[in-house]
Amino acid sequence: MSYSTGKPLFSTAAKFGLADDAKQKNANQYFSLVRDVGAKTPGSNDVFSGPFLFKAKESQEFLFANGKVSTKQGTGGGAHYYQDECYFLLYPGKFGFQSMFRLVSLAGDGPRVISVPSGGTSVVDQAFSILNEIDSDQYFWFDYEDMKLDRIVYEPAALGQPPSGKVVLGATQYFFNNGPATQTQKIEYTEVLSNTNSFQYTGGLMYSETFEASGGLPVVANGKVVVGSTQSVGWTLGTVQMVDETHNVQISLNIPPYTNASAVVTISVGKAEVPYILYLSSKLTGTRAQSKGIYRGSTGWDTTVIYGKVSPFARLVEPWECRRDTPNPIPLAANTRPTD
Protein backbone atom coordinates (compact mmCIF):
# COMPACT_ATOMS: atom_id res chain seq x y z
CA MET A 1 0.00 0.00 0.00
CA SER A 2 1.37 3.40 -0.98
CA TYR A 3 1.51 5.73 2.02
CA SER A 4 1.22 8.91 -0.04
CA THR A 5 -1.93 7.80 -1.90
CA GLY A 6 -3.40 5.06 0.31
CA LYS A 7 -3.73 2.83 -2.77
CA PRO A 8 -2.27 -0.63 -3.48
CA LEU A 9 -0.10 -1.84 -6.32
CA PHE A 10 -1.63 -4.33 -8.75
CA SER A 11 -0.38 -6.66 -11.47
CA THR A 12 -2.29 -8.45 -14.23
CA ALA A 13 -0.97 -10.32 -17.25
CA ALA A 14 -1.33 -7.13 -19.29
CA LYS A 15 -0.77 -4.27 -16.89
CA PHE A 16 0.97 -3.08 -13.72
CA GLY A 17 0.29 0.06 -11.76
CA LEU A 18 -1.57 1.74 -8.93
CA ALA A 19 -5.12 0.56 -8.24
CA ASP A 20 -7.90 3.11 -8.58
CA ASP A 21 -9.92 1.96 -5.58
CA ALA A 22 -8.25 0.86 -2.35
CA LYS A 23 -11.50 -0.57 -0.96
CA GLN A 24 -11.80 -3.28 -3.62
CA LYS A 25 -9.39 -5.99 -2.56
CA ASN A 26 -8.97 -7.81 -5.86
CA ALA A 27 -6.75 -10.84 -6.35
CA ASN A 28 -4.46 -8.84 -8.66
CA GLN A 29 -3.54 -6.60 -5.71
CA TYR A 30 -1.88 -9.38 -3.70
CA PHE A 31 1.83 -10.22 -3.76
CA SER A 32 3.83 -12.97 -2.10
CA LEU A 33 7.03 -12.00 -0.34
CA VAL A 34 9.70 -14.56 -1.29
CA ARG A 35 13.23 -14.90 0.01
CA ASP A 36 15.05 -16.60 -2.88
CA VAL A 37 18.25 -18.65 -2.62
CA GLY A 38 19.58 -16.78 -5.64
CA ALA A 39 19.48 -13.44 -3.89
CA LYS A 40 22.62 -11.38 -3.66
CA THR A 41 23.80 -10.10 -0.31
CA PRO A 42 25.04 -6.51 -0.59
CA GLY A 43 28.11 -5.45 1.34
CA SER A 44 26.42 -2.94 3.60
CA ASN A 45 26.13 -2.30 7.32
CA ASP A 46 22.65 -0.83 6.94
CA VAL A 47 19.84 -2.49 8.87
CA PHE A 48 17.31 -3.94 6.44
CA SER A 49 15.21 -7.02 5.74
CA GLY A 50 15.78 -9.04 2.61
CA PRO A 51 16.56 -9.17 -0.17
CA PHE A 52 13.14 -10.39 -1.31
CA LEU A 53 11.19 -11.09 -4.47
CA PHE A 54 7.63 -9.75 -4.78
CA LYS A 55 5.58 -12.27 -6.78
CA ALA A 56 2.14 -11.15 -7.99
CA LYS A 57 -0.61 -13.60 -7.04
CA GLU A 58 -2.63 -13.31 -10.26
CA SER A 59 -0.03 -12.68 -12.97
CA GLN A 60 2.73 -14.74 -11.28
CA GLU A 61 5.17 -12.01 -12.34
CA PHE A 62 7.91 -10.43 -10.25
CA LEU A 63 8.17 -6.77 -9.28
CA PHE A 64 10.94 -5.11 -11.28
CA ALA A 65 12.65 -1.70 -11.02
CA ASN A 66 15.47 -0.22 -13.08
CA GLY A 67 14.49 3.13 -14.55
CA LYS A 68 10.94 1.81 -14.82
CA VAL A 69 8.71 -0.04 -12.37
CA SER A 70 6.78 -3.02 -13.70
CA THR A 71 6.38 -6.77 -13.25
CA LYS A 72 8.18 -9.42 -15.29
CA GLN A 73 8.03 -13.13 -15.83
CA GLY A 74 10.83 -15.01 -14.15
CA THR A 75 13.35 -17.24 -15.84
CA GLY A 76 13.19 -21.01 -15.56
CA GLY A 77 9.48 -21.26 -16.27
CA GLY A 78 8.61 -18.43 -13.93
CA ALA A 79 10.06 -20.14 -10.87
CA HIS A 80 12.97 -17.78 -10.33
CA TYR A 81 14.22 -14.46 -11.53
CA TYR A 82 17.82 -13.78 -10.63
CA GLN A 83 18.26 -10.32 -12.12
CA ASP A 84 19.25 -7.76 -9.51
CA GLU A 85 16.39 -5.48 -10.52
CA CYS A 86 13.85 -7.97 -9.12
CA TYR A 87 15.38 -8.13 -5.66
CA PHE A 88 14.30 -5.63 -3.05
CA LEU A 89 15.43 -4.64 0.40
CA LEU A 90 12.91 -3.43 2.93
CA TYR A 91 14.41 -0.40 4.61
CA PRO A 92 12.49 0.26 7.85
CA GLY A 93 11.00 3.71 8.26
CA LYS A 94 12.27 6.29 10.70
CA PHE A 95 10.84 9.30 12.47
CA GLY A 96 7.08 9.24 11.76
CA PHE A 97 7.29 6.18 9.48
CA GLN A 98 8.34 3.49 11.98
CA SER A 99 5.67 0.97 10.94
CA MET A 100 6.44 1.38 7.20
CA PHE A 101 9.30 0.64 4.82
CA ARG A 102 10.98 1.72 1.60
CA LEU A 103 11.36 -0.67 -1.34
CA VAL A 104 14.95 -0.49 -2.58
CA SER A 105 15.91 -2.59 -5.61
CA LEU A 106 19.42 -3.93 -6.18
CA ALA A 107 19.58 -2.55 -9.69
CA GLY A 108 22.71 -3.16 -11.72
CA ASP A 109 23.48 0.54 -12.15
CA GLY A 110 22.88 1.34 -8.48
CA PRO A 111 20.11 0.95 -5.93
CA ARG A 112 16.72 2.30 -6.94
CA VAL A 113 13.83 3.19 -4.63
CA ILE A 114 10.19 2.91 -5.65
CA SER A 115 8.14 6.07 -5.26
CA VAL A 116 4.49 7.05 -5.73
CA PRO A 117 4.16 10.84 -6.01
CA SER A 118 1.46 12.23 -3.74
CA GLY A 119 -1.78 12.76 -5.65
CA GLY A 120 -0.40 10.93 -8.68
CA THR A 121 -1.41 7.74 -10.43
CA SER A 122 1.99 6.42 -11.51
CA VAL A 123 4.64 4.27 -9.88
CA VAL A 124 8.21 5.38 -10.54
CA ASP A 125 11.69 4.66 -9.29
CA GLN A 126 14.60 6.94 -8.62
CA ALA A 127 18.16 6.73 -7.40
CA PHE A 128 18.27 5.67 -3.78
CA SER A 129 19.59 8.21 -1.27
CA ILE A 130 19.92 7.90 2.48
CA LEU A 131 18.95 11.58 2.63
CA ASN A 132 15.36 10.85 1.56
CA GLU A 133 14.33 9.11 4.77
CA ILE A 134 11.51 11.60 5.31
CA ASP A 135 10.10 11.53 1.77
CA SER A 136 6.57 10.18 2.29
CA ASP A 137 6.26 9.30 -1.43
CA GLN A 138 8.76 6.48 -0.91
CA TYR A 139 6.99 4.68 1.93
CA PHE A 140 4.76 1.62 1.79
CA TRP A 141 2.98 -0.59 4.26
CA PHE A 142 1.53 -4.09 4.06
CA ASP A 143 -2.22 -4.55 3.98
CA TYR A 144 -2.53 -8.21 4.87
CA GLU A 145 -5.38 -10.61 4.50
CA ASP A 146 -7.86 -10.54 7.37
CA MET A 147 -6.02 -12.19 10.22
CA LYS A 148 -7.06 -13.55 13.60
CA LEU A 149 -4.98 -13.86 16.73
CA ASP A 150 -4.39 -17.47 17.78
CA ARG A 151 -2.24 -16.91 20.86
CA ILE A 152 0.35 -14.72 22.55
CA VAL A 153 3.67 -16.16 23.69
CA TYR A 154 5.94 -14.17 25.99
CA GLU A 155 9.70 -14.71 25.89
CA PRO A 156 10.49 -17.35 28.54
CA ALA A 157 13.81 -15.72 29.44
CA ALA A 158 12.01 -12.54 30.47
CA LEU A 159 9.60 -14.41 32.73
CA GLY A 160 10.75 -15.50 36.15
CA GLN A 161 12.93 -12.41 36.48
CA PRO A 162 12.45 -9.68 39.10
CA PRO A 163 10.87 -6.53 37.69
CA SER A 164 12.61 -3.21 37.63
CA GLY A 165 11.36 -1.14 40.56
CA LYS A 166 10.36 2.48 40.83
CA VAL A 167 9.75 4.03 44.24
CA VAL A 168 6.61 6.14 44.23
CA LEU A 169 6.37 6.85 47.96
CA GLY A 170 8.92 6.93 50.76
CA ALA A 171 7.87 8.33 54.13
CA THR A 172 8.82 8.09 57.81
CA GLN A 173 6.13 8.16 60.48
CA TYR A 174 6.84 8.75 64.19
CA PHE A 175 4.68 7.44 67.02
CA PHE A 176 4.64 8.94 70.56
CA ASN A 177 2.95 7.70 73.69
CA ASN A 178 3.12 10.18 76.61
CA GLY A 179 0.62 8.31 78.71
CA PRO A 180 0.88 5.65 81.41
CA ALA A 181 -0.91 2.96 79.35
CA THR A 182 -0.09 1.14 76.12
CA GLN A 183 -1.64 2.80 73.09
CA THR A 184 -2.54 1.35 69.69
CA GLN A 185 -1.82 3.93 67.01
CA LYS A 186 -2.76 3.64 63.35
CA ILE A 187 -1.88 5.52 60.20
CA GLU A 188 -2.92 5.07 56.59
CA TYR A 189 -1.21 5.99 53.30
CA THR A 190 -2.96 6.12 49.93
CA GLU A 191 -1.10 6.55 46.65
CA VAL A 192 -2.66 6.85 43.18
CA LEU A 193 -0.37 6.32 40.19
CA SER A 194 -1.17 6.54 36.48
CA ASN A 195 0.62 3.72 34.70
CA THR A 196 1.20 3.32 30.97
CA ASN A 197 0.81 -0.15 29.49
CA SER A 198 1.37 -1.03 25.84
CA PHE A 199 2.12 -3.69 23.25
CA GLN A 200 4.80 -2.09 21.08
CA TYR A 201 5.34 -3.51 17.59
CA THR A 202 8.94 -4.29 16.56
CA GLY A 203 8.72 -6.58 13.53
CA GLY A 204 6.80 -9.06 11.45
CA LEU A 205 3.20 -8.57 10.42
CA MET A 206 1.72 -5.30 11.67
CA TYR A 207 -1.52 -6.59 13.18
CA SER A 208 -3.94 -3.66 13.24
CA GLU A 209 -6.99 -5.31 14.81
CA THR A 210 -7.99 -4.80 18.44
CA PHE A 211 -7.32 -7.96 20.41
CA GLU A 212 -7.67 -9.34 23.91
CA ALA A 213 -4.70 -10.71 25.83
CA SER A 214 -6.67 -13.86 26.60
CA GLY A 215 -3.60 -15.63 27.96
CA GLY A 216 -3.07 -12.90 30.55
CA LEU A 217 -0.62 -10.04 31.06
CA PRO A 218 2.76 -10.06 32.82
CA VAL A 219 2.37 -9.46 36.55
CA VAL A 220 4.53 -9.92 39.63
CA ALA A 221 4.09 -12.91 41.92
CA ASN A 222 6.54 -13.79 44.68
CA GLY A 223 8.93 -11.16 43.40
CA LYS A 224 9.08 -12.50 39.82
CA VAL A 225 7.42 -11.62 36.53
CA VAL A 226 4.84 -14.22 35.50
CA VAL A 227 1.81 -14.32 33.23
CA GLY A 228 -1.25 -13.38 35.23
CA SER A 229 -4.95 -14.00 34.89
CA THR A 230 -7.05 -13.47 31.78
CA GLN A 231 -7.57 -9.87 30.71
CA SER A 232 -10.71 -8.63 28.97
CA VAL A 233 -9.25 -5.26 27.99
CA GLY A 234 -8.96 -4.60 24.26
CA TRP A 235 -5.44 -3.84 23.00
CA THR A 236 -4.09 -2.37 19.78
CA LEU A 237 -0.44 -2.59 18.77
CA GLY A 238 1.42 0.68 19.22
CA THR A 239 -1.18 2.37 21.40
CA VAL A 240 -0.70 3.21 25.07
CA GLN A 241 -3.33 2.60 27.73
CA MET A 242 -3.42 4.70 30.88
CA VAL A 243 -4.44 2.82 34.00
CA ASP A 244 -4.96 4.51 37.38
CA GLU A 245 -4.00 2.22 40.24
CA THR A 246 -4.68 3.00 43.90
CA HIS A 247 -2.55 1.44 46.60
CA ASN A 248 -3.42 1.66 50.27
CA VAL A 249 -1.13 0.96 53.24
CA GLN A 250 -2.34 0.70 56.83
CA ILE A 251 0.08 0.62 59.76
CA SER A 252 -0.93 -0.36 63.28
CA LEU A 253 1.54 -0.28 66.16
CA ASN A 254 1.25 -0.90 69.92
CA ILE A 255 3.27 1.75 71.75
CA PRO A 256 4.25 1.05 75.40
CA PRO A 257 3.85 3.83 78.00
CA TYR A 258 6.23 6.76 77.76
CA THR A 259 7.96 5.50 74.59
CA ASN A 260 8.30 6.47 70.98
CA ALA A 261 8.77 4.49 67.76
CA SER A 262 9.12 5.04 64.03
CA ALA A 263 8.14 3.28 60.81
CA VAL A 264 9.62 3.84 57.34
CA VAL A 265 7.11 3.12 54.57
CA THR A 266 8.26 2.48 51.00
CA ILE A 267 5.86 1.82 48.13
CA SER A 268 7.35 0.79 44.81
CA VAL A 269 5.77 -0.24 41.52
CA GLY A 270 7.22 -3.04 39.41
CA LYS A 271 7.83 -2.40 35.73
CA ALA A 272 8.39 -5.08 33.12
CA GLU A 273 9.60 -5.18 29.53
CA VAL A 274 8.67 -8.58 28.14
CA PRO A 275 9.20 -9.49 24.45
CA TYR A 276 6.23 -11.28 22.89
CA ILE A 277 5.13 -12.98 19.68
CA LEU A 278 1.58 -12.80 18.34
CA TYR A 279 0.76 -15.96 16.38
CA LEU A 280 -1.73 -15.10 13.65
CA SER A 281 -3.56 -16.94 10.89
CA SER A 282 -5.56 -15.85 7.86
CA LYS A 283 -9.33 -16.04 8.28
CA LEU A 284 -9.65 -17.07 4.62
CA THR A 285 -6.73 -19.36 3.86
CA GLY A 286 -5.30 -20.29 7.26
CA THR A 287 -1.91 -18.87 6.26
CA ARG A 288 0.14 -18.27 9.38
CA ALA A 289 2.17 -15.22 10.34
CA GLN A 290 3.83 -13.66 13.35
CA SER A 291 4.01 -10.20 14.85
CA LYS A 292 6.76 -9.41 17.34
CA GLY A 293 7.08 -6.70 19.92
CA ILE A 294 7.62 -5.76 23.54
CA TYR A 295 5.01 -5.48 26.27
CA ARG A 296 5.76 -2.60 28.63
CA GLY A 297 3.68 -1.99 31.70
CA SER A 298 3.10 -2.03 35.42
CA THR A 299 3.29 -5.52 36.87
CA GLY A 300 2.40 -4.92 40.52
CA TRP A 301 2.99 -3.03 43.73
CA ASP A 302 5.33 -3.80 46.59
CA THR A 303 5.11 -2.30 50.08
CA THR A 304 7.88 -2.38 52.67
CA VAL A 305 7.50 -1.19 56.27
CA ILE A 306 10.61 -1.05 58.47
CA TYR A 307 9.88 -0.42 62.14
CA GLY A 308 12.37 1.52 64.21
CA LYS A 309 13.41 0.66 67.76
CA VAL A 310 10.92 1.44 70.51
CA SER A 311 12.72 3.86 72.83
CA PRO A 312 11.67 5.06 76.31
CA PHE A 313 11.89 8.75 77.07
CA ALA A 314 11.75 10.78 80.30
CA ARG A 315 8.12 11.23 81.18
CA LEU A 316 6.94 14.76 81.63
CA VAL A 317 7.03 16.18 85.21
CA GLU A 318 3.70 17.49 86.41
CA PRO A 319 3.64 20.93 88.15
CA TRP A 320 2.59 19.48 91.49
CA GLU A 321 5.83 17.44 91.67
CA CYS A 322 8.02 20.48 92.26
CA ARG A 323 8.30 20.18 96.12
CA ARG A 324 11.99 19.42 96.59
CA ASP A 325 11.76 19.17 100.40
CA THR A 326 9.14 16.43 100.42
CA PRO A 327 10.30 12.81 99.99
CA ASN A 328 6.92 11.83 98.55
CA PRO A 329 5.54 14.72 96.52
CA ILE A 330 1.95 15.62 97.15
CA PRO A 331 -0.30 18.00 95.28
CA LEU A 332 -0.17 21.57 96.43
CA ALA A 333 -3.24 23.26 97.78
CA ALA A 334 -4.85 25.78 95.55
CA ASN A 335 -2.99 29.09 95.31
CA THR A 336 -0.11 27.68 97.38
CA ARG A 337 3.47 28.19 96.31
CA PRO A 338 6.39 25.99 97.35
CA THR A 339 8.46 27.35 100.24
CA ASP A 340 12.20 27.44 100.17
Image: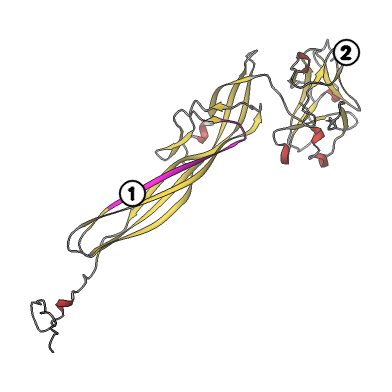
Give the x, y percent position of residue 163.
48, 42
| Residue 211 showing in the rendered view | yes
Is residue 330 in the magenta section?
A: no
Quadrant in the rendering for residue 149: top right
Q: Which mark is residue 250?
A: 1
Residue reaching furthest to the top: 77
Between 13 and 154, the one nearer to me in the picture: 13
Q: Which residue is mark 2?
A: 14
Residue at the image point whose x is 82% and y is 42% from the top: 131
Circle 1 packing at 10 Å, graded few (<14), some (14-19), many (20+), is few
Quadrant in the rendering for residue 224: top left
Give the x, y percent position of residue 191.
43, 49
Q: How is the image coloured?
A: secondary structure
- Magenta residues span 235-252
Compared with 305, 178 (above or below) is: below
Q: Quadrant of the N terminus?
A: top right
Left or right relative to 113: residue 250: left
Give the x, y percent position of residue 216.
48, 29
Amino acid type shown at disc 1:
Gln
Q: Secondary structure at mark 2?
A: loop
Q: Quadrant of the C terminus?
A: bottom left
Residue at the image point whose x is 60% and y is 21% from the top: 280
Compared with 283, 3 (above or below) is: below
Left or right relative to 29: residue 294: left
Compared with 10, 241 (above or below) is: below
